[in-house]
Amino acid sequence: MTFRTLLRALHSTDMVIIAFFSLLTLLNVAFAGRIPGWWIMVLINLVIITGICLLALARAASPLKILAYVHDWYVAPLVFFTFKELYFMIKPIHRGNDYDDWLIAADRWIFGVNPTEWLAQFSHPALTELLQIAYTLFYVFFLIVGYELYQRHSHGVFHFFMFTCVYGFYLSYVGYFTLPAVGPRFTLHDFNTLDLELPGLWLTPYLRWFVNFGESVPMGVSSAEAMAGAQRDVFPSGHTMMTLVLMALGIKYRLTSRHFILVNGMLLIIATVYQRYHYVVDLVAGALFAVVCLYTAPKVYLFLRDKVQTMDSLHPWSPDDR
């Protein structure tokens, strides 16, 4: 096997994932004195990079459909794994410093009030329930859109969709690295009284637990301890950014699911502030990041794809589908 053979087997999404994990590896090495267990993450990253290369080569060399499915969908859990790796890196790199004060000051400068506190006057259990459901559905949007594109057998559009999602999430992760913050549910409100101040109807407590679990928020501890253990993932609002990206792609490709994405997406964006996960300035940044993602993703995707001369004999899809 030559290096050129490997490049021909990798698609654009593989390449951007490998590039980002390589960056994380370099950061772990550079800040080894601050990050506990940095060598474990370096080892895991190298295993992941090697696994991606082997998977791409195996798919290229074999007609087995299971390899194609795994190669096309492995990115979904891996993006979440990347998110969790940041948990062990961001706080030590910044020596525990958060920048919520900057974001709070920006909101107050723009609106004259803290938006999450101002919105509390409109709270109602039915509205809280609806918006919490919409917020949690964020994790389902990508599977719905991806499945619809996959069922169309349009590999080219599907691969571009997956690339754009991965690329977009990684752009937001750069924001988390640059300006770590925990959000108003910890800084402007008492985290442990959220269910009392913003009660839902039936599902809200369970959905909040699900979101908290995904963001490594420790439960059954004081608000200060919960804040200390929470993931630094506020700026920009990844929920806002990637929901806007999905809306744009849904309209562009006239997806059947686009109406569901548009309606629930708008509710989700409102929920980010109403449910006290984000400052409004996070949403503004998320919208700007979405514009950057949508503008640059096609260019980066084509640049990576066109750098490799595709061989039909190495791929189960045509060159145009890559």
Image: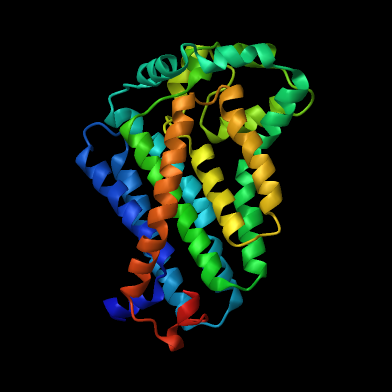
Residue ID at (38%, 68%): 302
Residue 135 appears in the picture as rendered: no
For the rendered model, the colour scheme is rainbow
Give the left or right position of residue 74, taking residue 258 as reference. left
Q: Position of residue 310 (x, y in %)?
A: 39, 81
Residue ID at (35%, 61%): 300
In the image, residue 309 above or below residue 75: below
In the image, residue 18 above or below residue 151: above
Residue ID at (28%, 76%): 3
Q: Nearer the viewer, residue 236 or 87?
A: 236
In the image, residue 301 above or below residue 177: below
Locate the N terminus by quadrant: bottom left
Residue ID at (34%, 52%): 20
Q: Position of residue 37 (x, y in %)?
A: 32, 38
Q: Residue furthest bottom?
A: 313
Residue 259 appears in the picture as rendered: yes
